[in-house]
Amino acid sequence: MQIKVLIADDHAAVREGLRALLARAAGITVIGMASDGAEAVNEVLRLDPNVVLMDISMPGMDGIEATRLLANRCPGARVIIVSSHATMEHVRHAIRAGAWGYLVKEAGVEEFAQAIRRVHCGEQYLCERLIDRLAGERISQGH
């Protein structure tokens, strides 16, 4: 069974790059793309993807608000936030909005594929770099 993915990012190069990366991942098919949060919500309603890769910083409706709307209206479409922001504050906002996962944009194709597969199976996912960074913050604070 193919996992259907929608990519939402305001940069065309990022959308196309993610699509090209995921084309090499077995069992994953990109079925659509959106350039802002409002378009992402509309495309999810139209295309019914299993997983949505959602940027946070987009014009108009941002990824957090779009994630909140999708969590309420389309709970079957599980959102993974994909962002260059890697702080605990950003992760908290994403999870509270209903995101199932969080990836930094620097993650490799294997980690993207792993996150998509795990979220599709009902697991939450935090990227390895983010976990390492957060663990480093805890250690430096003496915890």
Image (cartoon, rainbow, N blue to C red):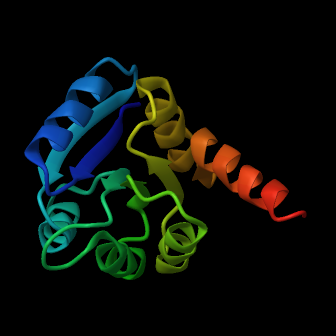
Quadrant into which the N terminus falls: top left
Q: Residue at x 47, y 48 (%)?
A: 103
Question: Is residue 58 visible from the viewing direction of this image?
Answer: yes
Q: Quadrant of residue 18?
A: top left
Q: Residue at x 65, y 49 (%)?
A: 133
Quadrant into which the C terminus falls: bottom right
Task: In the rendered view, tell whether residue 135 sits above or below residue 92.
Answer: above
Please give left or right for residue 36 compared with residue 84 in the image.
Answer: left
Q: Position of residue 87 (x, y in %)?
A: 54, 64
Of residues 27 and 1, which is closer to you in this image?
Answer: 27
Task: In the rendered view, tell whether residue 98 sits above or below residue 24.
Answer: below
Q: Position of residue 76 (x, y in %)?
A: 42, 63
Please give left or right for residue 23 compared with residue 116 in the image.
Answer: left
Q: Position of residue 118 (x, y in %)?
A: 58, 42
Please give left or right for residue 113 compared with residue 61 in the image.
Answer: right
Q: Quadrant of residue 105?
A: top left
Q: Residue at x 27, y 67 (%)?
A: 57
- Total marks shown come to 0
Q: Quadrant of residue 40?
A: bottom left
Q: Position of residue 136 (x, y in %)?
A: 74, 50
Question: Is residue 122 visible from the viewing direction of this image?
Answer: no
Of residues 29 and 89, which is closer to you in this image?
Answer: 89
Please give left or right for residue 117 compared with residue 8 in the image.
Answer: right
Task: In the rendered view, tell whether residue 3 sits above or below residue 6.
Answer: above
Task: In the rendered view, tell whether residue 61 sits above or below residue 128.
Answer: below
Q: Residue at x 15, y 74 (%)?
A: 38
